[in-house]
Image (spheres, coloured by chain):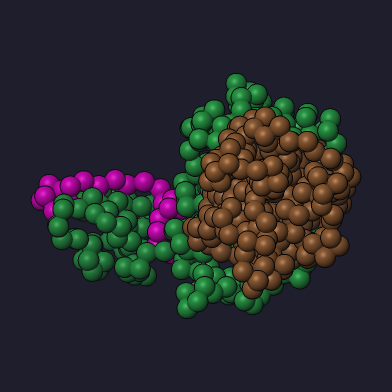
Amino acid sequence: MGDAVLEVEDLTRRFGSAVANERVSLRVRAGEVVGLLGHNGAGKTTLVSQVVGLLRPDSGAIRVAGADAVADPATARRCVALQAQAQAPLDGLTPRAAIEIAGRLRGMSGADARAAARALADELDIRDWFDRRATPDGGGLSGGVRRLTAFAMAAVAPVPLVVLDEPTNDVDAARRRRLWETVRRLGDDGAGVLLVTHNVVEAERVVDELVVLDRGKVVASGSPGQLRGTGDHDLRLELSLHPDGADPSDPPTDAPIPITRRVRAGRRVLLTLAAADAAAAVAWATALRSGERIEGYALAPATLEDVYLAATTTEETANA
Amino acid sequence: MPETTVSAPPARVPVGVPPRTGLWTAYTTLLRWTTAQIGAMLPLFVVVQTLLAAGIIVGFGFLVPDIDTPAARFLSTGAPTVLLMVIGLVMVPQGVAQARTSGTFAYQRALPVPRPLLLLSDLTVWLVVALPGVPVAVVVAQLRYGLRYTFDWPLLVAASVLAAATAAVVGYAIAVLLPPLPAQLATQVLVFFVMLFSPVTFPESQLPEWFQAVHDVLPFRPAADLIRAGLLSDGYDASPQDLAVLLAWCALGAVISVRALVRRA
């Protein structure tokens, strides 16, 4: 771990009366993959747009590799490689040409850019389409190959900070795994990676740190282990309710075991409990099911998704 | 028992701000990108320009029964300007509006290059697309009326490039000033204005005096007169005032476009 390559402090940005980012602070160190999680409209893309100089913050500071990104956005852009959420403009290009162009724009020599493009194509397994031209009507290359190419364009040159905004959209399962390995490799190579996503389950596997945004504010941050809470000993009991069925854990004191966190998401109720109470919890849930008060249940180790849902769900009722 | 130590390979990413990419490298690389995007359409553009030239030179000719040689010469030597204006004021804004809608515009603005270079590379490619309009119009007029030209080559080339560049940057400026849909509407209106209400394909003397004065400060008549002086150097002279007006519009369009590229919302 070295110095921070991205420092955001008290960043606030409004659109009219809507606050897209409210006093957001976060930090990405060199060699670290930081996940920025949040629902649609949580303010993730607004934050990224300010880092690359597309939007000016109302207040707060952004430093990229030590450079002041608010006062000197041109320098900040040299330090940041962005894979935007929108598809990259590839029409008329082959993946090979697009990745080489991205490398050349970052000052790589022609030979280095060609070699790096080939290596990435192998790493992401897109050699079959490497010399196929994308055509304007969305033809030539599939959405997934376009997305992987855009990812490769952000990953081709060594830069202090790589920002990936939903990099795995449209990408198939096998290549997703390769993409995550490459993300991890970028961090191991010394870059800081800011990974913007709403896919908690995938993010959990690669990130060192997590920041959860909800309605423009940071509502949780820390390592996945820290965020999961009381260590990795917690369990999650998931109750599937009947349509319009009453929730047997409402209020949580109705449950015969201590519930540390309760999240209702549609017909699912997620209850976090201590591992020591597993047997009692199963007995209770089995009784509920045989009494037809719930459709079914599942008991599993607590995941980051539970934490994420708890941090971003409004009907949350926590009980210590 | 001592543990085996495996040291990680040295970090590939250098510490601090990466050096600036050379301007020429950045420009030629962007040019490669833009050429790939627009270049595939180049043959199509030349066909469209040929059809447009035929429409103006042959079609407008039908409006004037028993067209005489001076009128035919005027019409034919105005046609290149119309073609350059159509590409610059319609195709360029459509391209920019599409880029803004699809996110390409924002994507390019996030690239690690000085943003004015984005305009420069776009402009270069649009010039290459637009300029064939001049020879195409000349050839069509030659076939229809059998005109004799007296070229002033340096003037013709300079005037064509300046007129095409002005139209393109003004079109670019319109597309960055207005939201995409109004921008497209505005450019359609402009083309009608250029074709029907501008003394490009007919002499200025046919307009009321106040309207002539308006056209003295708009770029269309000055562009047409400069190009005409390059095509028929024995009959028309280039005026420094026309050159100044055109340069002023070109500068204004460039300033607005660069500002829109550089500015953060």
Residue at 23% across, 69% down = A251
Q: Nearer the viewer, residue B252 or B194?
A: B194
Q: Is residue B43 above or below residue A269?
A: above
> How far across and down, in percent of the image, does residue B218 sit?
69, 65
> How far across and down, in percent of the image, does residue A295 sit?
17, 47
Q: Nearer the viewer, residue A241 or B56?
A: B56
Chain assigned green: A
Total marks shown come to: 0
- In this view, the residue farthest toward the left is A291
For the C terminus of chain A, the quadrant is: bottom left
Q: Nearer the viewer, residue A319 or B150?
A: B150
Chain assigned brown: B
- Is A291 part of what is drawn in magenta? yes
> How far across and down, in percent of the image, does residue B29 sit?
78, 40
Q: Relative to residue A173, is residue A193 drawn left or right?
A: right
Q: Nearer the viewer, residue A158 or B220?
A: B220
Residue at 31% across, 52% down = A237
Residue at 10% across, 51% down = A291
For the N terminus of chain A, the quadrant is: bottom right
> How far across and down, in percent of the image, does residue A98 sit?
68, 36
Residue at 78% across, 65% down = B245
What span is colored magenta in the figure?
A288-311
Q: Is residue B259 visible?
A: no
- Is B136 part of what is drawn in magenta? no
Q: Is residue A18 above or below residue B178?
A: below
- In this view, the residue farthest toward the top is A128
